[in-house]
Image (cartoon, rainbow, N blue to C red):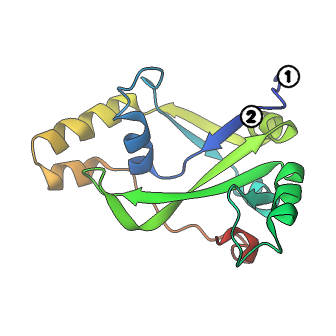
Amino acid sequence: MIEVCERCLTWIKPSFLWMMYRSGWSRKEGQERVLAVEISRAGFDWALGHACLSAYHPDVHAGRDAWREALRGAPARVQWDPERDWRLRPLPWRALQLGLSGEVVRRYAEEWLVSVVDVTGLAHAVQERVRAGDEAGARELLPEERVYVPEGGLPVSLVG
């Protein structure tokens, strides 16, 4: 059984290059390990279906109070950050970050988890090729990533 911190968020960052940007190629203090965590599609879709945007958007929310209320009651939250290229420069589209809290963290760890792989060595190998200016070599090492569309599409409430 996992002990869950009710006030804490566990973030899922599906983009490898965004994670490299965030962790400094797995070299920032406190971020010296990067794990590739695979979870079930059903679990990920459930979290998305029960998520609220982490920021207020007038095109999505009826008002700030409505957004705050939705955020308070949501077990998951969605944040959109600029995707990164192989040199970690921002791209014109955004990558999803999914924050889980409370009981959902337990479900994530105990029910949805499929595998965990330490990809720290991969992070360092890609960075070495980037430093050498070897774009083809860096791209060759990058994990395959595909556009993810939940069953039924992404809820309009998460398209901030």
Judged from the image, the secondary structure of the residue bearing numbered disc 2 is helix
> Horizontal and vertical percent for residue 154?
69, 73
Judged from the image, the secondary structure of the residue bearing numbered disc 1 is loop
Residue 1, label in figure:
1
114 displayed left or right of 28: right
Q: Could you say which is closer to the camera, residue 61 or residue 6?
A: 61
> Horizontal and vertical percent for residue 78?
67, 56
Residue 157, label in figure:
none
Disc 2 marks which amino acid?
Ala
Q: Could you say which is closer to the camera, residue 122 or residue 49?
A: 49
Residue drawn at point x = 18 percent, y = 44 percent:
130
Give the class, few, some or many, for how many residues have Cα within 10 Å of label 2's Cα (few <14, many ≥20): few
36 displayed left or right of 124: right
Q: Could you say which is closer to the camera, residue 24 or residue 65?
A: 65
Q: Could you say which is closer to the camera, residue 107 or residue 91?
A: 91
Residue 109, label in figure:
2
Residue drawn at point x = 83 percent, y = 21 percent:
3
Q: CA distance from mark 1 to mark 2?
A: 9 Å
Res 112 quadrant in image: top right
